[in-house]
């Protein structure tokens, strides 16, 4: 994961992303990556639930 913090408290999933960070261009080169799970991953504390996050801005 890049720039994503996730935690589960009871039945609530909290996601934190620092929108000031950048990880370079996307594969297409059209966008700048801010955060990514780099595919689908298990939600912390729940192996059945999956999440996939991509945060980006136009170049």
Image (cartoon, rainbow, N blue to C red):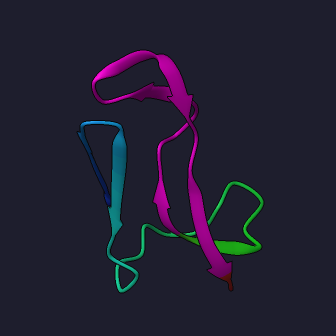
Q: In the figure, is residue 4 to the left or right of 36?
A: left
Tell me the quarter of the picture where residue 16 sits. Answer: bottom left
Residue span colored magenta? 34-57
Residue 13, compared with residue 25, is above or below; it is: above
Does the stretch in magenta take in 54?
yes
Q: Quadrant of the N terminus?
A: top left
Does the stretch in magenta take in 38?
yes
Residue visible at 35% across and 86% down in the picture = 20
Q: In the figure, is residue 38 to the left or right of 22?
A: right
The answer to whether residue 2 shows anywhere in this view is no
Tell me the quarter of the picture where residue 44 sits. Answer: top left
Q: Estimate the x, y position of residue 24 in percent, counting from the top left.
A: 49, 69
For the image shown, how many numbered marks are present on the structure? Answer: 0
Q: In the figure, is residue 14 to the left or right of 32?
A: left
Residue 31, compared with residue 41, is above or below; it is: below
Residue 39, compared with residue 6, is above or below; it is: above
Q: Estimate the x, y position of residue 25 in percent, counting from the top left.
A: 59, 68
Q: Estimate the x, y position of residue 56 in percent, counting from the top left.
A: 61, 72
Residue visible at 69% across and 74% down in the picture = 31
Query: Between residues 36 and 59, which one lies in front from this camera angle?
Result: 36
Q: In the figure, is residue 27 to the left or right of 50?
A: right
């Amino acid at each position: 994961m890049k720039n994503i913090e996730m935690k589960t408290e009871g039945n609530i999933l909290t996601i934190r992303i620092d929108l000031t960070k950048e990880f370079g261009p996307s594969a297409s080169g059209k966008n700048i990556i801010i955060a990514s799970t780099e595919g689908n991953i298990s939600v912390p504390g729940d192996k059945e639930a999956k999440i996939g996050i991509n945060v980006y801005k136009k170049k």
